[in-house]
Amino acid sequence: MSAPLPAPSAEALAHSGRLQAHIRDQVRAAGGAIPFSRYMELALYAPGLGYYSAGARKFGAEGDFVTAPELGPVFAECVAGAAMEVFAQLGGRFDFIELGGGSGAFAEAALRFLHARDALPAHYRILEPSADLRERQMERLREALPPAVFNRVGWLDGPPERGWRGFLFANEVIDALPTPRFAIRGGEVYEQHVALAADGGFALVEQPADALLHAAVRHVERHVGAPFPDGYRSELLVQLPYWIQAVGGLLREGAMLFVDYGYPRAEYYLPERREGTLVCHRQHRAHDDPFDLPGLTDITAFVDFTALAEAGVGAGFDLAGYASQSAFLMASGLAERLQAIAEISDPVEQHRRTNEVKRLMLPGEMGERFQAMAFQRAVDIRALFAAGDRSHRL
């Protein structure tokens, strides 16, 4: 049995209280209930109040969870190696766009790697909706990178608005997109909403699903070959095709790479997964209560990689491949990274970097839990997935 979470500070509790008051106002303004996806959007992204929009540290040992780039530079260097495969085929002018820059650790390591190999993109753009995170990224990269490299870095307020060529990358971004949740009652599809509870908190209620969510649930049932049983609840990111089109539709030549935790559809909607995949994180502890201290708690849902494949192909891309994170990293230069680690003279640093690779690669760590999926247009990076492609499972 895990130990209880430490109590938040009075300041943190006051912050959460302000966000809860804001959400309650939104619920009242909507007539008494808002879709769960709207609640998740407010809890994560409400300006100045949401989890990703406020000032608390989110990433790394001092935050609520650790992402692959926070472990060290190996993950970013391997992804940058994959980007170099794209850049080599494109020639000329190309860009790199990172969605959700986190602490800036990925950009720092990737840009150092590309700079050392004379393979810098014309521009490195970070699409970061959080003003607070953007400021932290800017400060970190300005201090860490040579001025000539930092001057290539810029930030986007929204998806690209004109055609471009290059490489788009997103690590643990799709899992944090506000997702609708559905429930099956008497064979009908309902959508979960959030209403006010009698004690002033929040409670889940169900309302008949709109046409879009209803059709999406029926599509999934046809794909898995059976209707969902009564009482089944899960997530379904109906806006994913529109999101992919928005962030990547204007990529004329190049590739998109997404790394996240999730399953192919047949595994995502298994009968035993009848409560869905929603998971919350606070101070490195996972739980399933999205109403626990909003603003201080991350809320995510696993990714349906079959849906991601459908969205990417629907946006006009070819599926380059789908593999575990470990298989993708092996194909993207991990052997060279391991050789460099073996040559480190400081035994303490060598041990730390070796542990970094273990966490990235071992099945019980990130190696199998995280998956990589890439799409291509006017380039060919299928070789990066040749040894471990799981596209047949989609």
Image: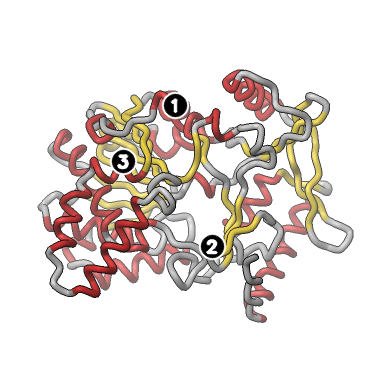
Marks 3/2: CA distance?
34 Å
Mark 2: amino acid: Ser
Whether tag 3 and tag 1 are in contact, CB under 8 A, the answer is: no
- Residue 299 picture location, percent across and down: 59, 54
Q: In which quarter of the image is residue 92?
A: top left
Residue at figure coordinates x 25%, y 70% from the top left: 144
Marks 2/1: CA distance?
37 Å
- Residue 359 picture location, percent across and down: 37, 57
Whether tag 3 and tag 2 are in contact, CB under 8 A, the answer is: no
Q: What element carries label 1?
A: helix
The residue where tag 1 is placed is 393
The disc placed on residue 53 is 2
Q: Is residue 183 above or below residue 116?
A: above
Left or right of 340 in this view: 136: right
Number of marks in picture? 3
The residue where tag 3 is placed is 327
Q: Is mark 2 on a helix, strand or loop?
A: loop
